[in-house]
Image (cartoon, coloured by chain):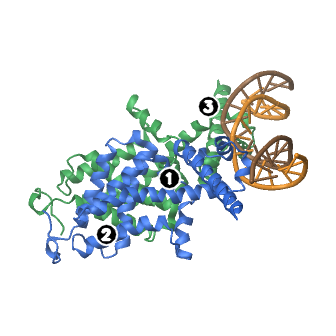
Chain colours: A blue, B green, C brown, D orange
Amino acid sequence: MGIAERKERQRAELREQILAAARRIVLDEGFAGLTMRKIADAIEYSAATIYLYFENREAIGLQLCRESFEHLVGYMAPAMQVADPRDRLIAIGRGYARFGFEHPEEYKLLFMTDSAFMEPVFAAEKQLDDVDDPGGRAFQFVVDAVQTAADAGAIVATDSELIAETLWTAVHGVVSLTLTCREVLVSSADALVETVCTTLLRGLAPASGDVTPGSRSTS
Amino acid sequence: MGIAERKERQRAELREQILAAARRIVLDEGFAGLTMRKIADAIEYSAATIYLYFENREAIGLQLCRESFEHLVGYMAPAMQVADPRDRLIAIGRGYARFGFEHPEEYKLLFMTDSAFMEPVFAAEKQLDDVDDPGGRAFQFVVDAVQTAADAGAIVATDSELIAETLWTAVHGVVSLTLTCREVLVSSADALVETVCTTLLRGLAPASGDVTPGSRSTS
DNA sequence: GTCTATAGGCTGATAGAC
DNA sequence: GTCTATCAGCCTATAGAC
């Protein structure tokens, strides 16, 4: 039955080629610049053929989005090596921001594209608990780090999801504003990331009074 | 010479009609949904006519942008009534966020549209010190409030522009992420605004050691 | 499986008649 | 000043031939 397998393999290969071409286009023109015709030209097939592999343009975007989440997690993951729970949170913030600055179009696709690509990626998880749920995993990563810090008494975080989202949205603000209108900002992007992260963590520090055993408040 | 004046007046009127129609369209379809043909239909003139009043679509967007900045300042200005310098900063943040939530398409036009509408609005000021520079004025508003708070010893802000941009970007993060993918956020938008603002201000509070005369550190 | 051809849209902008 | 007509281009998606 080798013939069926070869066909299957070839099919998967073309699908991969489509995605690779689409990725290249999105990376340097943004999702708005992604058209079926451009993909078709790149893979040297007709535009109609693409519809045999993906339902529509959105479906391609969604798949790219999934992969970009993996990419993002790759930028945040090394922060796990940082022992100090507060420094770890800062490291996560830095990694997240660096991903945005180094891969602006991917970042825009994930978090700055109106068409809710991200929502399905999250929704997939909520309904059928999808094993492969990169969006949720990325967020869970931050929640866990917050929870760990809170448990260690390094920060005050009654609601770890709220705190995780606070950190996330704040850093997202720096990245997104930098990507849309860099010229308007006086400060450097790095300085802003640094100031946002450290100031927030300073704000989350336990007051001198409520130091929990196991923590040692720095300054 | 009443005839020339009447003509001038009529010209200004039509220009205003174009802007009003454009505003309406942007408000409920976003800038991407703004087309010359739609404006033309709305004002009951041909599309070609619009080009006699505005150089192109971008020029219309720019003018709308200018006006939206005024609108935004209107949301932040009442914060000046707040006496306490820290509460005032929080009030500015709340006002800013409320503008974003209540006028999402205007907000997107100002801060989330790739095409740098905002930059010219700022640039106008930098080159010829434009009396009518709404963008710069909005930002200066925050810088001043930061400076005032720093002077009063209510916060530590060596570089008031950096701190102003820190506050701005952080709140922008909440607003923009809410506007692009509300579904993904677990916490309420208001809770996030509140947490971001208060946590940042807590982080900016002078350490117990360096309290400046005139300030009184609240817990 | 893949193609060509095309339907059926949309867009910004302009030339030239009135 | 305003129009019509049009250029020149873009797009997604599909029907039907091969």
Q: CA distance from mark 3 to mark 1?
A: 24 Å
**Residue type marked 3:** Glu
Of discs 3 and 2, which sits in the foreground?
A: 2
In this view of the protein, can residue A63 be seen by the observer?
yes
Where is residue A48? Give x, y as percent. Answer: 75, 49
**Residue receiving disc 2:** A146
Q: CA distance from mark 1 to mark 2?
A: 31 Å
Residue situated in front as seen by the camera: A108 or A186: A108
Where is residue B171? Give x, y as percent. Answer: 38, 57
Residue A38, located in which quarter of the rendered image? top right
Where is residue D17? Give x, y as percent. Answer: 90, 47
Where is residue B58? Give x, y as percent. Answer: 58, 37
**Residue receiving disc 1:** B107
**Residue type marked 1:** Tyr
Residue situated in front as seen by the camera: B192 or D7: D7
Which structural element holds mark 1?
A: helix
**Residue type marked 2:** Val
